[in-house]
Amino acid sequence: MTDKCHPGINLGIRHGEAHQHAEKVMFGFWVFLMSDLVLFGVIFATYVTTVTPMGIAGGPGPADVFDLKSVFIQTMLLLTSSLTFGIATLMLRHEKGIRNIVLWLCVTLGLGLGFLTLELRDFATMFASGAVPSRSGFLSAFFALVPLHGLHVAAGAIWIVVMLAQVAIFGLIPMVKTRLLRLALFWHFLDVIWIAIFSIVYLGGLA
Amino acid sequence: MMGHDTELRRELRRYLIGFALALILTVVPFALVAWGALSFGTALSVIGISAILQGVVQLRFFLDIDLSTQKREDLHLILFTVLLLSIMAAGTIWIMASLANRMIA
């Protein structure tokens, strides 16, 4: 057994059973993440084909409905939350105690909820101005892509709450450790998807 | 115990370096678009290059992907996904762009 048995941050040899168990379940989770990546990729491709005069169909275009400042704040929140989850993972890997792990998970959760609040506020503004999914192909594709990512973040936030409960009830047993490791991968993955969203959808649309 | 904490500090530093690089690669394209000083083509290439670089930075520093130490099947999984994705995504965009051209012409 080596200190690194799967891609991503490893628990390390000193975690014994949990580390050994991690190889199989982490590989399985990578398979899921990669299938999710394909899903996002195809919806991205669909979106790109609709950002045309034909796709916009005389309705509001990117410049009319996107709020660059709000998107920038959302980007900062999500990027910082990826860092704070990384710190939580290091606290787990180096056995710095439940208190530290819970603290950094809570910071991550707070940043994630801040991101979702701003995103929902932007959607509400769009809806109020008549930019609804049924208005044009462009808006249909936009509301298929960006809220899909938001839904993933919401699922990640719920997952953090569930893991906080499991840490409180079971303590840091091997199963809880590898679940935290998979949640960390999921959270970092969501930030990587967000890079593509802010670059292609928002910056590409406003450039 | 001493060596243990040094390792933690080194890994923390790696996360912070990754965060700083990601921050730069985010702020630059946002600033360019906010100022609107560049032509559409130039802006698009800066956005594209920053996005690809930031993707690599996050994979390297946050997801800890280091191709030299990967197990083979993990590497195959990632490469195969990228292959599938490029066929489907690039193919979709190619076909639809070609269709649009033909319909306008």
Image (cartoon, rainbow, N blue to C red):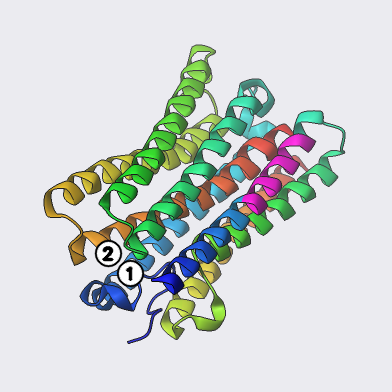
Q: Residues within 10 Å of mark 2 (few under 14, many from 20)?
A: many
Give the residue at mark 2. Answer: A178
Quarter of the image containing the C terminus of chain A?
top right
Quarter of the image containing the N terminus of chain A?
bottom left
- Nearer to us of marks 2 and 1 is 2
Residue for point 17% across, 47% down? A168
Q: Position of residue A64 (x, y in %)?
A: 66, 21
Residue type at mark 2: give it: Thr
- Note whether B71 is above or below A203 in the view shown: below
Task: Choose the circle earlier in sequence order: 2 or 1.
Answer: 1
Residue type at mark 1: give it: Met
Residue for point 30% across, 76% down? A14
Residue segment shown in magenta? B20-32
- Note whether A132 is above or below A170 in the view shown: above
Q: Position of residue A170 (x, y in %)?
A: 13, 54
Give the residue at mark 1. Answer: A26
- Note whether A75 is above or below A83 in the view shown: above
Does the magenta run of residues contain A176?
Answer: no
Specify the quadrant of the image occupied by residue A50.
top right
Out of A18 and A183, give the one closest to the viewer: A18
Q: Residues within 10 Å of mark 1 (few under 14, many from 20)?
A: many
Q: Give the SS element for disc 1.
A: helix
Q: Main secondary structure of the magenta part?
A: helix
